[in-house]
Each structure stands twice: as C-alpha cells, then as structure tokens.
Image: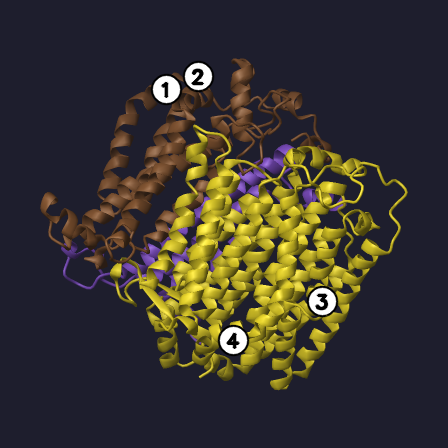
C-alpha cells in the first residue's frame, strides 16, 4: 500500500485534511439520537412487512432488505459509525450475506436432487405437502416467499450494511499512517479513540473496499472486503431465480 | 439427464463463492482450496457437457433446461449446444490454469478468490443462457466482478483502469439493454428461439428491429473492445494484477463475442443481414478499421501488457469481421480463433507476469536478453507470440486461415487484405519482442533490482514464499525474486496447447456442425 | 416526424426516455468530476428503466395481481426487468463510488482530466 504514496500524491493528506475539514460526519445531536431511537423499531417492522408481503403487494426481498439495512445506517448516523461498527461485528454481516446465498442456492438446488428442474418449487410437494398441508401449486407461492425472505432480504441487508461501513470508514488503505486519512469518515472519532485497535480495524476494513490484497488476516478484512464482491451476489440471487424473484409475480399463479 | 449439468455449471461457482469469506472467519487460507476445487469441478462438468453434445455420445446435440419447469416462452431456458460447450470448456480450463498460477502470485485475499469464482459463474451463465435478459444480468455480473478484480491491486492506477472500464462497460451493457427493450417491445418475448421466429414474422426491415440490433451491436462492441470503443482495454489490462489480466483478457471479451455470435445468428438470423446490407457493410468496415488500428497501436507501445491489450483489439476486430461476413467458413474460423486467442493471451499475460515478478521486466526494453536467463518462459512466450501472428503449426493459424478463406469465398477481398496487413503488423511487434528477448544484449545493469518494481516484487510476497526449484533462470543470482515452478508449468502447458490445437479442426467441426447447420439453413 | 406535436403529446414518455438518457450520457462524457459521472450513469440507466415501464403500461390497466381487478392488467414482465436492472445499477454505483474513493485517497483529486494527466505521465 505504500505505493499509494509514491504515485503523484499531491497532498500531505492526513494532517491537511483534518485541518481543512471541519465537517465531521458524526454529530452529537440530541434530536437525531432521540428520533432514531424512537423510529427504528417501526422502520424495522416496516422493512420486514415489505419483505414478507412481496408476493401480493409492491415490495419483496430487495426493497425490504434495503430498509432493514437502513436501520443500521440510521443507528450509525445517530450514534457514530465506529461504535456501530464495533457493535455490529463483521461476523454478522458476512454471515448474513453468505447465509442468504446459501439458503437461496439450497432452495433452488434441492429440486434438482429430487429430479425436477432448477428452482422448481412444486418438487417439494411430495416431500413436504402433507407435513405442511399445502397443495401443489401453493408451493410456488411459499417457495418464492422463502427465497425472497431467507435469501434475497438477507443478502441485500448484509451487503448494504457491509458496503456502508467500508465506504464510510474513509479511504486511506495504508496501515502505517494510522489514521483514516482524508476520508469522509470520522476524523473526529478515529484518532481520539483507541487508535491502535480502531484504525487498525478501519484500515484493514477500508483497504478492501474494492478487493485489495491486504495482507492482514483478521476477520475484519475478510468480512468487509467482500462487500463489493458480494453485491454481485444480489444480482446472482436476483437472477438465478430466473425472473421469479419478482415481487408481483402475478403471472406466475 | 444431461441437461441438469447446465444449471449446475452456473450455480456451483456462484454458491462456492460464499465459502472463502465464510470460512475465512474461522480459518486461514481457505480461499485457494475452495476456488481450486470448484474450478476443477466446473472443468469436469464442462467436459461432460462437451462430450454429451458431441456425436460420439449418441445423444441429442442440444440440451435445454427450463428453469423452474416453466416452458419457453414463459420461463427462462438454459441451452447447451456445441458452441456453448466449447466456450464452457474454455472457461473451465482457463479458470483451472489461472488458479494454479494464482496460488503463488497475485492478491491472496478471500475476497479475491470469491471474486474469481463469481466471475467464472457469471461467464458460464452468459455462455449457457437462452434468454436475452438473462444474458444482460450475467453480462453485468461479469462486468461488476471484473471491475472489482481489476482494482484489486496495490497500484492506485488499477482503480483508474477499473473506473474507466466501469463507465464504458456499463454504457455498453445499458445499450444492450435498450436493444433488448426494443426487441421486447417489437415481439413480446425474451426467449432467443422464440424471438427469432417472431422477428422473422415481423420482417427484418422494420426500423424497430434494425434499431434493436444496432443498440445490441454497439453494446457488445463496447464490451468486446472494438475500435473506437476500445479505450478502456489498455488501461484495464495493464494496471490489473497479472493473474487478473490473464483471466479477464482470455475470457471476458471472448464470452461477449460468443454472445454476439449467438444473438446475431440465432436471434437475428442470416436473413436479417441479407435484408440489411447496409448494416453488414458497416460492421465489416468498422471491424476492418479495428483490425488495422489495433495492430498499428500495438506497434507504438513499449509496455508489454499494453501491446497485448491493443493486439486484442485487432484480434477481436477479426472476429467481428468474421461475424459480419455471413460465411460458414469464416464463422468456423471465428470460433476457433476465440478459443485460440483465449489460450494465447492467457499464456502471454501469465508469461509476462512471471518475467515481471522475477526480473521486474515491464517494457520491451527490459526484456533485452532475458531469454538467456529465462529460457523456458521466454520460449513459451515466443511460441504464443508466433501463434498470435499465425505461424503454423498453431491454433492461431487455423483461426486466421479460415476467416481469410471465408472472406475470399464471400468476395470480400478487402477483408482478406486487411487480415494480411494485420498479420504483417503483428509479425512486426512480435518480431521486435522476440528479437529483444533473444538477440539483444541485456542492459549493463544486469543485477540492478529495477527500482520501480522492487515495491511490486516485495509486495508480491507470494513469490517469495515460492518453493525451491526456480526453473526460469540459468544462474539464479540475478533474480529479483524466485518464481514458483507451477507458474512456469502453467505457462508451458498453455503454450503447448495452442500448438496442439492445430490438429483439432476436426473436433471443432464435429461439435459445431449441427449449430452451423441451424445458423445457415 | 410529420406529427411532432402528436408524438410529444401522446408518446411523451418515450420522448422523455430519450431526453433523460441523453442527458445522463452527456453527463458521463462531458463532466469532469468523477462523482458527477456516476450520477450521469445513474440518470442514463434511469431513462432506460422509464422506457421499460412505459412499454408495460396499458390505459385502464390494473396492477398485475389477480385479486386486484378483472380488467386488463399492465404487463408485469418489464416491471420485473426494471427491478433487476435497478439492483444491477445500485451495485454498479457502489463499485464506482468505492473506486472513486480509492482514487481520491491516492491522487487527491476527483477530476478526470487531472487524473488523465497524472496517470498518463507515469
């Protein structure tokens, strides 16, 4: 990463930026904190509602997942990005995104094991029709719901959360400068906090906002570094379900 | 039940892409084993598919898998015929080769391997789909992951190359989407087979149909990097890490060209081109210009990866010309050239990567006398370079020969002349490279650890971990860093394969016969 | 082009699609700021989505869910296409912005012409 500094870097970034930028992202605003504290449960419920209602009203996995991610974003804006990141733990974000893909792929591939086509929900009927008390065609509806809720919403929420923390944490990929550099991130926080741990996590995390080959091997790296890659998972999930992941799949019934 | 292979080929790499980061939470170094296992599995499945569509297996020559059981045109189809199987096999083989190469090179993060797997899945999706919008989605997946992979280098210029590619590539995919939108408005269906019938019923002089093809063509020209829409390619290929350059140059434009062939011949059939001679002539003209300009620009470059990038512009110009020629021979040559070019470019980029890691050689001048110190790698690059020129026996010869033959058969002597000129130009810059490799005296500072590159080499820490046995030098004293044997082995295998495929025209013909029969009826 | 006014009043959505896409494309090409280029990219794609959604519309059509009405339904397929394309567009914007941030941190500028000079010189 030191090569960054070799290449025509026109500014002495860390100190300049901290002097030049008087506009930190995190502000101790009582209004925001209180509002967020009051509003979050409702936003989360609304996000879940939109996710669950995807097959019979506008909505679905993607929209609901975005709303759920926005809950975390609001918390980050109100209470500080670094503390939210510490609270959220990268494991959750990574597991959320990968679990979503795994569930989607699982639901899609099991019909192939049963001899039917890929994503053929009606193949579950002989297996689960009696236990769940559903008719054959109803499996299409519930299969789609399962894919939307357990697959797409998870993936989108995980990816958006991870992406936000990667992008918001600033830009400097160097680990030796020990700052968050001239990022839009928390200049106010990062250097006053436990710099060793925080900027380490930040740097390692930030260094992979695209996929860099950072040689850190802590979980932050592996986790956060995945966002821009896993966002293509969204496409994959959206696509691999043919166009069936559509929310108003009216013509499928 | 061979049509079950089709969704598996696509779904497995995409599913496997979650394991490097997931396992990376607990364990170390999980990326490469997962990626390698998946790539091997994909290569085996692709081989199975190729065998299943070949006449030797006695089964149907074309497999169709309907997703979710919905029949076309209501559902999305996955189609595997001879043409798709060839491309799928190429993707599998190159993926395995690049992964063997990548173990000791290049970025080593879980995200990188995850990205490679996603890219493989996306490419296979593009190859095997039978639905126009599904093609768009996979096209975008491939593009997205390419942008991220190209930027995965320490060099910030890689981010610049990736961003440039992002703007141009997305514009291309969006133009393709507009084209699909026009076609959808005209016919009401998105399935390729169905749309061919509907477009025929609509008539090929309908401006909506013509406009649709125009947009689709421009979109693909941006993705394939045909002059004048090629400007992203040199920067992206040059600044990307060597592993990524090899993978992307071999496969991404190739699959986009395959998609263009599929759409031009399966959806807008040869009758469309017959009814629109203006479009055919325009495409021929642009392709010819691309061939000449690509070779000329390659001549002017000094940095090796840039030379190869511009040479790609010329080669794909040739393939576009072959598509526009509407000749079965030329199309046969185009498909062979797609495969051959993929292997040749992979060899060249990987070889350049080996020499860059070992000697810090980035420009042609740096290569002075390198053949003495790296006889094997130098030799393999010479073989691949000569194959690129088209000197027999090599797969490059086959491809160019059939394309030129098709041009002459169709009476387009101009295209044949252009191909000849481009061969001469290619001979010039490859010849210059070989001369520098073999006959020039190395610069006085033999053991000067090229300052600008020591950073890369130190960061290229993987090559420091290389196991013993550096077969790429005679003395080993003057190296910057030892290079793992397996990297050289991969280069050797790929280079030899370009020579071996010279005798494979019959195999290609077998697989492609029913496909071309349908295209050219 | 004989009935320009007729086209603009009855097919205004298509005219708008051309306008929005063209403006987005122009922003991508002519504006030197990287973030504005990304905004232009988004506008370009939004224009395309407008085209798809317009092509789906039927006058007097109901939402394509069987309980909502018995009349003609608007076509659901282009809506699904647009949904997927929106997701794709978001991912592209995310990758583009991440790359822009990286470039900014390395070179300290968001201007494409400055970057072209600096990188072209190396």
Distance, label 3 to label 4, CA atoms, is 23 Å
Asked if B85 appears above or below A166 in the picture, the reply is below
Tag 4 residue: B509
Chain in brown (letter):
A
Q: Chain of mark 2?
A: A
Q: Is residue C94 visible?
A: no
Callouts 1 and 3 on one subunit? no
Q: Is residue B492 left or right of residue C47?
A: right
Q: Is residue B502 visible?
A: yes
> Which shade is chain B?
yellow
Which residue is at 71% across, 61% downward?
A: B383
Distance, label 3 to label 2, CA atoms, is 66 Å
Q: Residues within 10 Å of mark 1 (few under 14, many from 20)?
A: some
Tag 2 residue: A28
Distance, label 1 to label 2, CA atoms, is 8 Å
* Quadrant occupied by the N terminus of chain B: bottom left
Pair 1/3: label in front: 3
């Amino acid at each position: 990463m030191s090569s960054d500094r070799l290449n025509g870097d026109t500014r002495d970034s860390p100190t300049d930026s901290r002097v030049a930028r008087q506009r930190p992202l995190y502000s101790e605003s009582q209004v925001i904190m209180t509002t967020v504290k009051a509003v979050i449960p409702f936003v989360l419920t609304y996000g879940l509602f939109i996710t669950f209602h995807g097959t019979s009203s506008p909505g679905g996995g993607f929209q609901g997942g975005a709303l759920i991610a926005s809950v975390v974003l609001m918390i980050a804006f109100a209470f500080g990005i670094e503390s939210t990141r510490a609270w959220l733990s990268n494991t959750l974000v990574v597991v959320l995104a990968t679990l979503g893909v795994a569930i989607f792929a699982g639901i899609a591939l099991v019909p192939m094991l049963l001899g039917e086509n890929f994503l053929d929900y009606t193949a579950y009927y002989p297996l689960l029709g009696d236990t769940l008390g559903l008719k054959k065609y109803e499996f299409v509806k519930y299969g789609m719901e399962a894919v939307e809720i357990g697959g797409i919403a998870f993936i989108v929420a995980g990816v958006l959360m991870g992406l936000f923390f990667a992008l918001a944490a600033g830009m400097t990929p160097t680990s030796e400068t020990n700052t968050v550099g001239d990022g839009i991130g928390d200049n106010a926080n990062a250097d006053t906090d436990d710099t060793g741990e925080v900027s380490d996590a930040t740097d390692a995390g930030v260094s992979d906002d695209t996929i860099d080959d950072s040689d850190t091997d802590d979980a932050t790296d592996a986790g956060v570094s995945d966002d821009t890659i896993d966002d293509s998972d969204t496409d994959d999930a959206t696509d691999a379900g043919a166009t069936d992941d559509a929310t108003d799949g009216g013509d499928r019934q | 039940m061979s049509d079950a292979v089709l969704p598996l080929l696509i779904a497995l790499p995409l599913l496997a892409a979650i394991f490097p980061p997931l396992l990376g939470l607990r364990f170390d170094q999980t990326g490469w084993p997962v990626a390698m296992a998946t790539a091997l599995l994909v290569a085996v499945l692709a081989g199975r598919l190729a065998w299943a569509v070949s006449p030797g297996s006695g089964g149907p020559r074309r497999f169709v898998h309907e997703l979710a059981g919905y029949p076309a045109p209501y559902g999305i189809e996955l189609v595997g015929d001879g043409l798709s199987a060839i491309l799928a096999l190429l993707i599998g083989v190159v993926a395995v080769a690049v992964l063997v190469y990548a173990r000791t090179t290049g970025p080593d993060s879980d995200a990188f391997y995850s990205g490679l797997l996603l890219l493989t899945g996306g490419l296979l999706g593009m190859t095997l789909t039978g639905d126009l919008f599904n093609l768009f989605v996979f096209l975008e997946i491939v593009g997205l992951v390419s942008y991220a992979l190209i930027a995965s280098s320490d060099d910030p210029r890689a981010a610049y190359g990736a961003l440039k590619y992002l703007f141009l590539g997305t514009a291309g995919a969006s133009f393709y989407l507009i084209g699909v939108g026009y076609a959808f408005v005209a016919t009401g269906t998105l399935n390729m087979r169905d749309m061919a019938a509907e477009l025929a019923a609509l008539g090929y002089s309908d401006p909506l149909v013509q406009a649709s093809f125009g947009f689709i063509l421009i979109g693909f020209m941006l993705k394939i990097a045909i002059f004048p829409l090629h400007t992203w390619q040199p920067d992206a290929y040059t600044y990307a890490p060597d592993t990524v350059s090899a993978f992307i140059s071999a496969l991404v434009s190739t699959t986009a060209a395959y998609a263009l062939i599929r759409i031009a011949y399966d959806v807008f059939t040869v009758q469309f081109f017959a009814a629109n001679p203006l479009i055919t002539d325009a495409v021929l003209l642009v392709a010819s210009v691309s061939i000449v300009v690509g070779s000329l620009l390659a001549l002017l470059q000094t940095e090796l990866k840039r030379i190869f990038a511009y040479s790609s512009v010329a080669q794909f110009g040739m393939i576009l010309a072959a598509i526009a020629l509407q000749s079965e021979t030329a199309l046969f040559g185009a498909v062979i050239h797609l495969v051959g070019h993929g292997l040749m470019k992979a060899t060249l980029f990987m070889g350049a990567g080996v020499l860059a890691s070992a000697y810090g050689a980035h420009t042609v001048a740096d290569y002075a006398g390198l053949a003495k110190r790296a006889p094997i790698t130098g030799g393999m690059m010479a073989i691949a370079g000569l194959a690129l020129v088209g000197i027999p026996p090599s797969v490059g010869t086959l491809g160019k020969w059939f394309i030129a033959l098709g041009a002459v058969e169709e009476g387009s002597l101009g295209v044949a002349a252009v191909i000849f000129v481009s061969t001469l130009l290619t001979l010039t810059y490859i010849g210059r490279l070989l001369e520098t490799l073999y006959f020039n005296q190395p610069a006085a500072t033999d053991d000067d650890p090229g300052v600008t590159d020591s950073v890369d080499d130190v960061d290229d820490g993987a090559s420091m971990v290389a196991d013993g046995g550096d077969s790429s030098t005679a003395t080993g004293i003057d190296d910057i860093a030892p290079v793992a044997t397996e990297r050289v082995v991969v280069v050797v295998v790929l280079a030899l394969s370009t020579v071996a495929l010279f005798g494979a025209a019959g195999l290609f013909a077998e697989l492609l016969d029913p496909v071309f029969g349908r295209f050219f009826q | 082009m004989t009935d320009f006014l007729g086209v603009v009043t009855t097919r205004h959505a298509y005219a708008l699609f051309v306008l929005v896409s063209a403006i987005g494309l122009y922003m991508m090409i002519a504006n030197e700021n990287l973030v504005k280029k990304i905004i232009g990219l988004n506008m370009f794609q939004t224009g395309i989505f407008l085209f798809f959604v317009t092509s789906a519309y039927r006058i007097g059509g109901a939402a394509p869910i069987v309980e909502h009405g018995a009349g003609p339904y608007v076509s659901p397929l282009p809506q699904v296409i647009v949904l997927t394309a929106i997701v794709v567009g978001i991912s592209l914007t995310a990758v583009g912005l991440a790359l822009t941030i990286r470039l900014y941190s390395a070179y300290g500028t968001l201007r494409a012409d400055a970057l072209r000079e600096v990188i072209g010189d190396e």
